[in-house]
Image: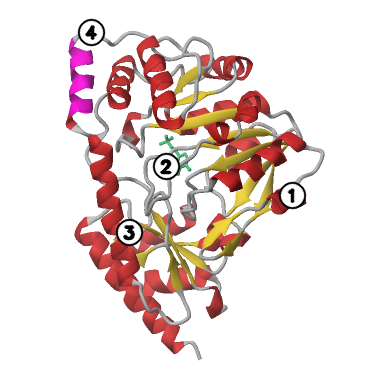
Amino acid sequence: MNAILGEVKALQASGVPLASLMRGEPDFPTPAHIVEASIKALEAGRTGYPDNRGEKALREAVALKLRRDNGLTYDPGTEILVTTGATFGIYAALMALINEGDQVLLPDPVYDAYQSPVRLAGGECRAVTSAIHEGRFMVTEEALEAAWTPAAKLLVLNTPWNPVGTVPTRSELEGIARFCERRNVYLISDEIYEAITYDGHTHLSPVAVAPSLRDRTIVVNSLSKTYSMTGWRVGYCAGPAPLISAMYLVLAQSSRGPATFIQDAAAVALSASQDCVTEMVNEYSRRRAQVQQALAGLPDAAVLPPEGGFFAMADLRAWGIASNEVRKRLLNEYGVVVVHGGAYGPAGEGTLRISFASGGEAFTKGLERLAQGLREMGTARG
Ligand SMILES: Cc1ncc(COP(=O)(O)O)c(C=O)c1O
C-alpha cells in the first residue's frame, strides 16, 4: 500500500492530476448531533482521564447496541472494553491471546493491517485461501482445515469483508464456528462494516449465529465507518470477562482509551436515532450502482457485486495479466488510482479493488478513467 502511495505522490509532485478510487475513508461529515454532543461534553468539562475500561455510559450504550443490533448480551461491567478505534481493539486482542510462535489464520485476501500486529505479538500469519464462487469470494470449512496446524490459535474474521465485499451467510458462519470449536481456535470478529450492506444481505455476528463461540470470541467494532468518525478514534470490543481483562491490561499500559468527551459523543451516536446511518448507506448504495454501471460489459471481466462495505472487486482473472501491472497502467496511462488484488494476498491476484467510500466529481472522473482504461486494455489483449 505504501508503495502505491509513493507512486501516487511522485506523479502528483510532477503535476499529473490523478483521481483516486483507493481510500477507505468515508467522505461524509460526522452527523451534527454527534459533533454537538462532543462540544457539549467539552463545555461541561468532560476533559479528565477516562475510565480505562471505557466510560460507564459508553459501555452501557455499547451493551444496548449489541443487544439491539446483533442479538448479543454482554455485561458492560466486565465484558466490554472501549478502544481507540478497531485498530487498537485488534492489537489488544492479539497481544492478549497470542504467544510466541502461535499461528493466526487470516482469510486471503486480507485487510492489510492485520499482519503487522500479529507479528508484533509474536505470532505467525497463516493464510486461509478463498476462492471466487458464483461472483463472491468466500472461505470454506475445507479451506480452514487445509490451513490449520496444531499451532493455530486464532482466526481473524472480517465480516462484511474488506477488501472483497462478501457478507458471510448464516450457514457459512455455522461452518466457521464448527471449525473453531473442532480445532479449539479463538476468533476475532472484526465487524466494522456491519451497517453497510446491500441487496438484502444482512450482517450476522458469528456469536449470534453460534452462541457456543461466545467463550472463544472477541467482537471488535468501531464508530469509524458506521458514523463517519474515522478521526475520532473510538471503538469497542466485547468478549468473555477473562479475555476482556487481559486486553484491559494491554490498554492500561498503552493507549488508555479515547478522550472522555469523545466517549460521550460515541454514546450518543450509538443510542440516538440511526437515520443518519441509513442515509449514508443509501448514498453508498447509489455509488455502488454507479460502479457497476460504469464497468458493465468489460471484455472478459466483471465487477463482483459487493454485498457489504464500500469496495468493489473487478475480476480480470481471465486476462492472465498480473493485477499490479494493470494497476500501474491505470495509474500511469489513465490517471486513476486503484489497489491491485494481489496486494491483499495471492487469492486476490487478477482482481482490482475499487473504493466508493468517497463520491463527488473525483469519484465520477475516476470511474470514467477506470472504465476507459479497462475497456482499452481488455480490447487490446491480443
Ligand atoms: C477491516 C477493517 N478493520 C479495522 C479498520 C480500522 O478501523 P478504525 O478506524 O476503527 O481503527 C479498518 C479501516 O479501514 C478496516 O477496514
Q: Is mark 2 within 8 Å of ligand 1?
A: yes
- What residue appears at the point 55 percent right and 72 percent down from the top-left corner? 322
Residue 306 is drawn in which quadrant? Answer: bottom left
Q: Earlier in the sequence, mark 2 or mark 1?
A: 1
Which residue, given by chain and number where applicable, does mark 4 sit on? 45
Left or right: 327, with 14 as reference point: right
Residues drawn in magenta = 33-43
Mark 3 and mark 4 in contact (Cβ < 8 Å)? no
Is 237 included in the stretch rendered in magenta?
Answer: no
**Image depth: mark 4 or mark 3 in front:** 3
Whether tag 4 and tag 1 are in contact, CB under 8 A, the answer is no
Q: Is residue 298 above or below residue 225?
A: below
Dot 1: element = helix
Secondary structure at badge 4 equals loop
Look at mark 1 in the image and give the residue it sits on: 147
In the rendered structure, which disc, 2 or 3, sits on the residue that comes first in sequence? 2
Q: Residues within 10 Å of mark 3 (few under 14, many from 20)?
A: many
The circle on residue 193 is 2
Which amino acid lies under the numbered mark 3 shown in the image of this protein?
Answer: Arg
User: Can residue 286 be seen from the camera position used here?
Assistant: yes
Secondary structure under badge 3? helix
Magenta region, main secondary structure: helix
What distance separates the C-alpha of mark 2 from that of mark 3?
15 Å
